[in-house]
Image: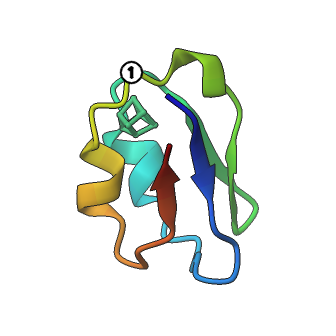
């Protein structure tokens, strides 16, 4: 499962970093980044919680 952030939509709320059970995201300095993409299990929790519709799962 490949997770990515669409930075055209991302408002850096940091919600994904809070809800992801695998710590795939890191949010600091007003920016959210994917730091452990290999840990993604494809659970869709981040997609369901993102307020910006910015997370894509393939
Ligand atoms: S799909 Fe689940 S494991 Fe993957 S990044 Fe989103 S919340 Fe984390």
Disc 1 target residue? 41
From this view, report whether residue 39 is shown above or below residue 37. above
Residue under the image location 62 percent in, 17 percent down: 38
Q: Which colour scheme is used?
A: rainbow
**9 left or right of 50?**
right
**Residue 17: horizontal and vertical position, in percent?**
47, 45
Whole-percent x and y of residue 45?
26, 44
Q: Position of residue 16 (x, y in %)?
A: 42, 51
In percent of the image, x 39 and y 58: which residue is there? 15
Quarter-wise, where is residue 35 in the image? Answer: top right
Residue labelled 1 has its Cβ within 8 Å of some atom of ligand 1: yes
Count numbered badges in the picture: 1
Q: Could you tell me which secondary element the residue under label 1 belongs to?
A: loop
Furthest residue to the top?
39
Q: Which residue is drawn at 27% across and 32% down?
A: 43
Image position of 2 with respect to 29: above or below: above
Placement of 50 over or under 17, stated as above or below:
below
Please give left or right for residue 16 compared with residue 6 in the image: left
**Farthest residue in the right direction?**
29
Relative height, residue 49 to residue 40 (above, below): below
């Amino acid at each position: 499962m490949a997770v990515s952030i669409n930075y055209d939509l991302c408002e850096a709320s940091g919600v994904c970093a809070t809800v992801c059970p695998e710590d795939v995201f890191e949010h600091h300095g007003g920016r959210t980044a994917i730091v452990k993409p290999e840990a993604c299990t494809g659970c869709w929790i981040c997609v369901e919680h993102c307020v910006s519709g910015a997370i894509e799962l393939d």
